[in-house]
């Protein structure tokens, strides 16, 4: 086995000024944000070192033992070929542990060169808790910790306009930075901080809403020995992920002068935009919509994973045509070329042989996903063409059949709101006919936020498709829609 990773494997390492404070050191941040910063340092003279703050109790022992070095192993399908690449990440300078050394945490806030704050504390991390106090060392929640950090900075630099930060959260919630700023201002009020602090937060700190996308699966156990042999060292923090990445940052274009993601030789799929909403639409309708359409159909066909679905001739063709012929035409306010390019990337990602994404895992909370990801495309296609999108209706019907909770004599382990699951079971048990079932499901305005029985022709089309599925004709149904 090769020797453990340490600084001797990076003899020309440059310790850049500590311009970035990063809350969290998990797989995603290391395999995405830190990778981006490392590329910027090498190719765009970004010159920024990262200090990782542990936002929860504990330490990053492996990171410290490896001198804050780690490797990314990225893989995926590009131009029809499987590619893989590794990169030794040297952008992280050190770690700080507020629960062990709160003074060091506050000292970090007083460093004049700090400019950027990145975070990924999971979707549940950006929350407000009235139990957090200014004098806690540290406060429990991430927003409270950040408020304390920024207040220390505000006090030390006497509210200087030049000492604000660019705050770029990557948590997967809508308008993540807007929400984070709102909570910081809530803490300022709760802790009765001077009005000047809230004014400084609003006027001299830049909060950037973001959309991020890259699967970072973590340590590649099955391939680790092979990769270590290629690298010549053993890396306990080897972070595997897909080559594909997307980072949409909602900010003024001037941010590119400080965060030059457009100045690298490596093609970074990172955009600074005025409004992230259209990009959220693209992701939800195309990528998430493809997943949500694929899941019930794949499960009913006995398929386990996304990759296997893309290897199934009938289902792969069906999902591709659903996206290109129904979903893309339903999105009228975004250039078709951009939508098609995104869709091609999506299908390359789905075909990645190194990612095993189980359909039952994606099926979590499918009822709300159908509402958010499929129904807008159904309505949009109808509005654009005057016709119902047959493939989307088939996917909708497959979802309804899946939520019966059994298929061909076997139960299906669904994971959703218990009340939603119970409601669907009741519909299947009590409906006198498939027509009555379709009417009942479509008429649940509370679930769909509209009465779908008002959609012309939807109920009879759904009924007929359910009848074919019940007759065991699902595969025939998919093949019949092929063009």
Image: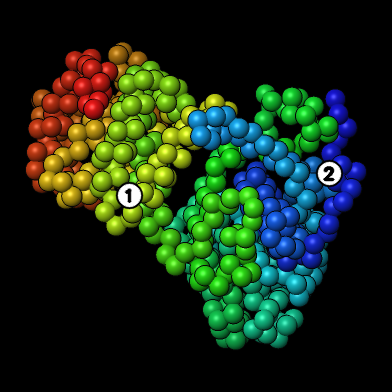
- Assign a secondary structure to mark 2: loop
C-alpha distance separating marks 1 and 2: 47 Å
Is 287 placed left or right of 171 in the picture?
left
Mark sitting on residue 66: 2
- Residue closest to the eye, 192 or 172: 172
Q: How is the image coloured?
A: rainbow
Is 440 placed left or right of 413 in the picture?
left
| Dot 2 crowding, Cα within 10 Å, few <14, some 14–19, many 20+ | some
Earlier-in-chain disc, 1 versus 2: 2
| Quadrant housing the N terminus | top right
Residue 345 shows in the view: yes
- Assign a secondary structure to mark 1: helix
Residue 444 to residue 212: above or below: above
The residue drawn where x is 18% and y is 20% is: 468
| Quadrant housing the C terminus | top left
Q: State the image coordinates of residue 434 (x, y, percent, origin top left).
A: 13, 26
Q: State the image coordinates of residue 384 (x, y, percent, origin top left).
A: 18, 50
Mark sitting on residue 336: 1
Q: Is the Cβ of the residue at disc 1 closer than 8 Å to that at disc 2?
A: no
Residue 137 shows in the view: no
The residue drawn where x is 76% and y is 44% is: 88
Residue 412 to residue 439: above or below: above
Q: State the image coordinates of residue 287 (x, y, percent, origin top left).
A: 40, 42
Mark sitting on residue 172: none
Is 28 placed left or right of 108 in the picture?
left
Residue 439 to residue 130: above or below: above
Q: State the image coordinates of residue 96 (x, y, percent, origin top left).
A: 78, 58
Is 49 placed left or right of 391 in the picture?
right
The residue drawn where x is 23% and y is 14% is: 472
């Amino acid at each position: 086995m090769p020797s453990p990773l340490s600084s001797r494997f990076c003899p020309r390492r440059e310790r850049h000024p500590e311009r970035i404070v990063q809350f969290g050191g998990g797989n995603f941040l290391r395999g995405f944000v830190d990778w981006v910063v490392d590329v910027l340092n090498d190719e765009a003279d970004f010159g920024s070192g990262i200090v990782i703050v542990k936002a929860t109790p504990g330490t990053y022992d492996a990171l410290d033992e490896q001198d804050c070095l780690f490797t990314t192993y990225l893989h995926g399908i590009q131009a029809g070929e499987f590619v893989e690449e590794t990169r030794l990440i040297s952008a992280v300078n050190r770690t700080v542990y507020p629960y062990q050394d709160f003074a060091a945490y506050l000292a970090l806030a007083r460093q004049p060169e700090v400019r950027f704050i990145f975070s990924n504390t999971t979707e549940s991390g950006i929350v407000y808790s009235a139990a957090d106090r200014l004098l806690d060392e540290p406060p429990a929640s991430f927003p409270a910790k950040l408020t304390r950090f920024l207040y220390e900075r505000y006090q030390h630099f006497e509210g200087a306009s030049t000492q604000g930060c660019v705050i770029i959260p990557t948590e997967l919630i809508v308008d993540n930075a807007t929400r984070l700023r709102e909570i910081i201002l809530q803490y300022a009020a709760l802790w009765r901080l001077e009005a000047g602090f809230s004014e400084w937060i609003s006027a001299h700190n830049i909060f950037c809403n973001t959309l991020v996308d890259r699967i970072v699966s973590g340590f590649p156990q099955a391939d680790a020995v092979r990769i270590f042999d290629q690298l010549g060292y053993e890396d306990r923090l080897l972070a595997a992920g897909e080559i594909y990445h997307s980072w949409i940052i909602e900010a003024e274009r001037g941010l590119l002068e400080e965060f030059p993601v457009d100045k690298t030789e490596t093609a970074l799929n990172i955009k600074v935009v005025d409004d992230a909403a259209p990009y959220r639409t693209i992701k939800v309708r195309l990528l998430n919509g493809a997943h949500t359409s694929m899941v019930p159909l794949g499960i009913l066909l006995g398929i386990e994973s996304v990759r296997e679905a893309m290897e199934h001739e009938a289902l792969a063709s069906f999902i591709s045509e659903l996206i290109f012929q129904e979903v893309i035409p339903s999105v009228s306010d975004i250039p078709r070329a951009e939508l098609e390019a995104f869709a091609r990337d999506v299908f390359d990602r789905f075909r990645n042989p190194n990612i095993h994404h189980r359909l039952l895992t994606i099926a979590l909370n499918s009822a709300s996903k159908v509402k958010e990801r499929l129904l807008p495309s159904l309505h949009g296609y109808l509005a654009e063409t005057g016709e119902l999108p047959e493939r989307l209706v088939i996917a909708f019907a497959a979802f309804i059949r899946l939520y019966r909770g059994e298929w061909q004599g076997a139960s299906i382990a669904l994971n959703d709101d218990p009340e939603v699951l119970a409601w669907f079971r009741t519909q299947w048990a009590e409906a006198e006919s498939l027509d009555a079932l379709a009417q009942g499901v479509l008429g649940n305005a509370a679930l769909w936020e509209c009465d779908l029985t008002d959609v012309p022709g939807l109920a009879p089309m759904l009924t007929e498709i359910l009848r074919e599925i019940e007759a065991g004709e699902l595969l025939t149904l998919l093949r019949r829609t092929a063009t």
